[in-house]
Amino acid sequence: MRTRTAGPIALAAAAVLTLAACGGSDDADSGSTPEVSDVEAADFPEGSTMAALAEAGSITVGTKFDQPLFGLVGPDGTPEGFDVEIAKIIAGALGIPEDGIEWKETVSANRESFIESGQVDIVVATYTINDERKQVVSFAGPYYEAGQSILTLASNEDIQGPDDLAGKKVCTVSGSTPEANLLENYPDTEVVPFGAYSDCLEPLRGGQVDAMSTDNVILAGFAADDPTFEVRGEPFTQEPYGIGLALDDTDFRMWINDVLEQAYEDGTWTEAWEATAGSVLPTPEPPAVDRY
Ligand code: GLU
């Protein structure tokens, strides 16, 4: 059996040089468009998911379609954002070009079931790694660390942190970690769950809810798009974002971790950030991957 690390990773590094030569600013709206490496199925271990995907020349990726900065569908029907760029980096390292990626909308509540049923090969969707989810899916990464925060109307000074949510109506999304945290740790808060975060915007604008709560970076995207809204206080949880994949596919998980580490080292990860979420948020250090 062949080992596969050197081929795709070295080629991914070469892709960065091409990317750097292209320059970033023209691509700011659509992402950093990482180059596609020149690997073939035979470069991967026989029978691996990597070999199967490379052979097919296509990958199905679950992502959000309604979240600015991370996964937001543009006018052409293709999503854009940091999660989308992470998926493109993984696809590129499999030799799969952008037009070989099938984007499937996932909402918070269906990510595990989409992976379990094989409807998607991976999920890259502001997806927090936690022990409960690890019972049913696996996670490569983390590739970013977010934290739960609060969005209110800019005119609302009453809510500055989670302790101010007692007696308030707070919109969030079914199946998300912020929903679980509010229900478990803030019992005096009236949780109003919707299917997707963008569903919270009009109720918040209209005063049907007092606040919306989810990860700080998701809220930052909505606030950047509309100054009616402001993010309040500091993050009050840790939300390490992972790439979800089938529970027992350790080889694929470890290979994605290799790809991430390579992207950290060669600057591809930073390019992806700066072309997307970096338009609003400072560029962080990439987090260490967790090879559990
Ligand atoms: N990161 C959190 C989660 O995975 C909240 C964001 C989301 O719902 O996508 O549940």
Image (cartoon, grey):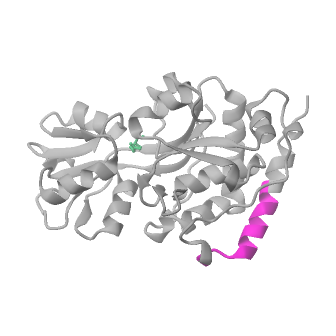
Establish if 60 lies above or below 34.
above
Residue 242 appears in view: yes
In depth, the one of 222 and 106 nearer the eye is: 106
Q: Residue at x 24, y 30 (%)?
A: 184
Residue 58 colored in magenta in the image: no
Establish if 141 lies above or below 263.
above
Q: Residue furthest front?
A: 76
Establish if 171 lies above or below 46.
below
In depth, the one of 226 and 185 nearer the eye is: 226
- Find residue 254 and report its image quarter: top right
Which residues, given as a range, are shown in magenta? 12-25
Q: Quadrant of ligand 1?
A: top left
Q: Residue 95 at x, y = what percent?
A: 78, 49
Residue 160 appears in view: no
Which image quarter is the N terminus in? top right
Residue 16 colored in magenta in the image: yes
Q: Residue 9 at x, y = what percent?
A: 79, 50
